[in-house]
Amino acid sequence: MILNKWINNLGLIFLCLILIIASIQILNINLIKSGSSEQKVNEREIPEFQGLASQVPNIEIAKIIDLLIFSDYTFIMTVCDIGGNCVSDMVVMTVVDDTAPDLNSPADITYNDGNTGNIITWVAGDRNPAYYHVSRDDRVYIFDTSWSNGSLIIDIDGLVGGIHTFIITVCNIGGNCVSDTVIVTVVDDTAPDLNSPYDIMYNVSSTGNIIIWVAGDRNPTYFHVLRDDAVYVTDTNWRNGSLIIYIDGLLEGTYSFSMTVCDGGQCTSDTVIVTVVDATDSSTPSSSLTIATGETGTFEMVILLLVFVGIGSIINRRKRKVN
């Protein structure tokens, strides 16, 4: 009786062992990325999956998920027993890039007008870089341009004298952007070139009288003219070349015209004396009306010389007649 019970119990033990062996599972994991071809991941393809079939997989799977880049993914897990019976489950995962790129902040820059080799170097980094653009003084300097991790070098040669604001904006494919600003100061330490016209004399009734100054500079900004220390021409933009000032209509007298031309930081001045005479005034020496060089007394000397020559000729003729 006891032997029969032992045999029956032994049979139950063997049956339980068979059921335990039959319940051992083999785990297959399929990783499918949405919008792309399927990719099967198993123990042999990715080292993190080694030994995965014999342990709880959740922690090991997390290691692979951490490596995913910005996109949508579909995970399908299929679990089968040795009898070929399987069950599956699907999880859709969206990896969101909500982190802005890294971007350094270079120091502001100052350089002298005319110098070359001036650049701004920004260093940017991101797992999913997309594009960047640069503005100068609120105007587009570089349009949207693709970038990769590393240095972004911007050439800033040839700027006019003054202060300029450069702003870079760097973005990734998730639409996250970061910006930085660099102030560039260009020092114009060279004054404009300006000639010195001769002084002028003209008749009060004449027309077409002008002063012509010639000015030049790499960064011209404005000029103005004073007449006897009063504003004659207000601040006016100028370009390299002739600056023509009309001086008709002045009353009889002497006037001082001062021209000042400026660039980004330097100015140059010159003065021309204008004398206006009245040819109908008997008190005005006729000799003054013919002086073109601005010198006085030349014509009077010529008249006196002619008078002396004439008197000498008359005296010589009379002496000949007497003899």
Image (spheres, rainbow, N blue to C red):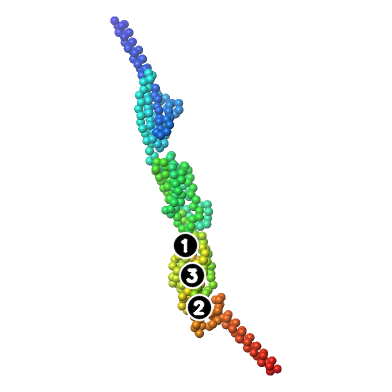
Q: In front of the other: label 1 or label 3?
A: 3
Mark 2 or 3 closer to N-term? 2
What residue appears at the point 44 percent right and 72 percent down from the top-left corner?
230
Instruction: Locate residue 18 relative to residue 244 in the image: left or right.
Output: left
Find disc 3 in the rendering and name its residue.
Answer: 245
Q: Is residue 265 visible?
A: no
Q: Is residue 182 above or below residue 250?
A: above
Residue 118 locus on image (x, y percent) = 51, 52
Find disc 2 in the rendering and name its residue.
Answer: 203
Residue ranking furthest to the left: 1
Q: Amino acid at mark 3?
A: Ile
121 or 158, nearer to the observer: 158
What residue appears at the point 42 percent right and 49 percent down from the top-left corner?
180
Find disc 1 in the rendering and name its residue.
Answer: 221
Q: Is residue 3 above or below residue 247?
A: above
Residue 162 locus on image (x, y percent) = 46, 58
Residue ranking furthest to the top: 1
